[in-house]
Amino acid sequence: MAELHRRSVAVIGAGPVGCALALLLRRQGVDVDVYERETESAGSGSGNSFNLTLTLRGLSCLPRSVQRRLYLQGAVLGKRVIHHRDGAISTQPYGTSDTHHLLSIPRRVLQDTLRDQALRAGARIHYGRACVGVDTGRPAALLRDSGGATAWVTADLLVGCDGAGSAVRDALAAAHPGDLWVRRRTIAHGHAEITMDYGDADPTGMHLWPRGDHFLQAQPNRDRTFTTSLFKPLTDDASRPHFAGLPSADAVSRYCAAEFPDVFGRMAGVGKDLTARRPGRLRIVDCAPYHHRRTVLVGDAAHTVVPFFGQGINCSFEDAATLAGLLEKFRFARREEDETLVEAAVGEYSDVRVKAGHALAELSLRNLEELSDHVNSLAFLDRRALERRLHELHPELFTPLYQLVAFTNVPYDVAQRMHGEFSAVLDSLCGKRDVRRERDAIIGEFVAAYGPGFSAGKLRTG
Ligand SMILES: Cc1cc2nc3c(=O)[nH]c(=O)nc-3n(C[C@H](O)[C@H](O)[C@H](O)COP(=O)(O)OP(=O)(O)OC[C@H]3O[C@@H](n4cnc5c(N)ncnc54)[C@H](O)[C@@H]3O)c2cc1C
C-alpha cells in the first residue's frame, strides 16, 4: 500500500507567533519545520526587552495547558493606576469581571514557553537559517545558513512569521506587485526602557503617568520588579535618534524631575538610560492580502501595529488560531496533494484577517491619545464610568471598546464599527451635560433609543 503523503508546513521565524502556530499545527498532525535566522544561543523573538500583555483574546487561542504555564509565570493586572501631575493617584478597572485583566509576561518567558511546547509537540526548529527568497509557485523558501550557504526548502504551505521586517512579505510584494500592496509608516513617538526601583508599588495594576503627548509606563513583573518605559516623540536626527528636548543626561534628569516628581528619586540612572540607549522607533506596516497562493503571512509579518492597545501579539495568536482552524476545516492534514484546498483555506484566512489587522492598526494609533492625555481628564473618566455602568446594567446592549477589543473574540473591525455607532449616540446624549450627576438619566435615554429587544449582536453583521 502506498504511504500516505504527510502534509508539511514550513514556518519562517521562530518568534512567539511562529512557535504558537507550529504548536497548533502539530496538534493537527501536520509536519512542521520552523526556520529561524538567529542562532539557538542568541535566541529568537524580536529581541525587544519589553514585557507583553496578553488578554483573553490572545490567551484563548492557545491550548489550556499553555495558558496555565503562562499564568504561573506572569503577573495579573486588573486595572490602570494613573499618576496625575499633581501627585494624586486614581485607578481605572480594565473591565467588569475577573477575566477582564492583562497577563503581563516578560517577552523572553513567553518566547521560551512557546518554543518548548512546539518542540515537545514534535515541531522541528532549525536555527541560523535566514529566509532570503521565496518562490510562491512551489511554494519554497531560499534559506541562507550562518556560513553563507543557501538551499531551497519546499512544503505544502509556506508561512511567514518573520516579524515587522518580514523577508517573506517583501519577497511576495516584489514578485507580485500588482497583487499585494504594503504600506509602511513611522510615528513621531519612540520608546525606551528605564531602570526604576519601584518594588513597593501596587503590583496588580499597570502604572501610567500621562503627560500630554508623552507618558511613562511601569509594568509589574511576577517577582515584584517593574519594567518601565518612556513613550515620547523623537527628533528627526537620523544619525543620533533621541527623544525631542532630551539631548543630554542633564536635560533628561531635569525633564523627569519636573514630569514625574513622585518617582524621580527611584530612577537613579535615568540620564544614562535615556542617552546611552537608542530609543526604538515605533512603526506600522499594513499589507493586503496576507497571502499569495500557498504562501501566507501571520503575526507582525502581516500587520505591525503600535503597542498602545497592547494587542499586537493577541491579534497574532488569533491569526495563528484562525489559520489552523481553517486548515482543519479544509481537512488539510488528511487530504492528499490537493493544492486548491490549501489555497482556499489561506484565501479565507486572508479575507478575515486583513479586515481585523487593519482595524487594529487604527485602534492602536488612536489609543495613544487615551494613554498620554485623556486618562488624565475628569470628563474622560466620567464617560468611562458611565460606559461601565451601562454595560453592567445592559450587557446585551453595550460593551465598552476596551473590553470588546481585549476580552472578547469579536473581530477588531466589528468592535470598531460597533463602538463608532454607540459612541455617536452616547456623544449626542452626553452633550454638555454633567455626565457624573446625570449618569442614570443618560443610561435610561440610551436604552430607550435602542428599545427593548435590541441586541448589539445585530450590529456585528453590519
Ligand atoms: C515596544 C513594544 C511593546 C509591545 N507590547 C505589546 C503588548 O504589551 N501586548 C501585545 O499583544 N503586543 C505587544 N507588542 C507587539 C508584539 O511585540 C508583537 O506583536 C510580537 O512580537 C509579534 O511576534 P512575531 O512572532 O510575529 O514577530 P517577532 O517577535 O518579531 O519574531 C519574528 C521572528 O522571526 C525571525 N526572523 C526575522 N526575519 C527572518 C528571516 N528572514 N528568516 C528567518 N527568521 C527570521 C526573528 O529572528 C524572530 O525570531 C509590542 C511591541 C513593541 C514594539
Image (cartoon, rainbow, N blue to C red):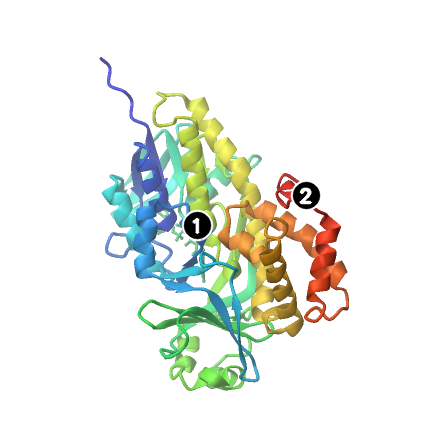
The answer to whether residue 142 is left or right of residue 456 is left
Residue 58 image label: 1
Q: State the residue at coordinates (50%, 79%).
A: 247
Q: Quadrant of the C terminus?
A: top right
Q: Is residue 196 above or below residue 23?
A: below
Q: 407 or 28, which lies in front?
A: 407
Residue 453 image label: 2
Depth check, mark 1 against mark 2: the one in front is 2
Q: State the residue at coordinates (56%, 48%).
A: 412
Q: 343 or 462, which lies in front?
A: 462
Q: Is residue 120 above or below residue 293?
A: below
Kind of residue sitting beneath label 2: Gly
**Coordinates of residue 221 in the picture (x, y in percent):** 35, 68
Q: Quadrant of the N terminus?
A: top left
**Coordinates of residue 405 in the picture (x, y in percent):** 54, 53
- The response on whether ligand 1 sits within 8 Å of label 1 is yes
Q: 393 or 285, which lies in front?
A: 393
**Coordinates of residue 191 in the picture (x, y in percent):** 47, 68
Disc 2 is placed on an element classified as: loop
Instruction: Quote the CA–CA distance across marks 1 and 2.
Output: 31 Å
The answer to whether residue 26 is left or right of residue 83 is left
**Coordinates of residue 151 in the picture (x, y in percent):** 29, 36
The answer to whether residue 264 is left or right of residue 439 is left
Quick check: can you spot residue 356?
A: yes
Q: Is residue 14 above or below residue 273?
A: above
Question: Of the residues under marks 1 and 2, which one precedes in the sequence?
Answer: 1
Image quadrant assignment for residue 298: top left
Disc 1 is placed on an element classified as: helix
Kind of residue sitting beneath label 1: Gly
Quick check: can you spot residue 238?
A: no
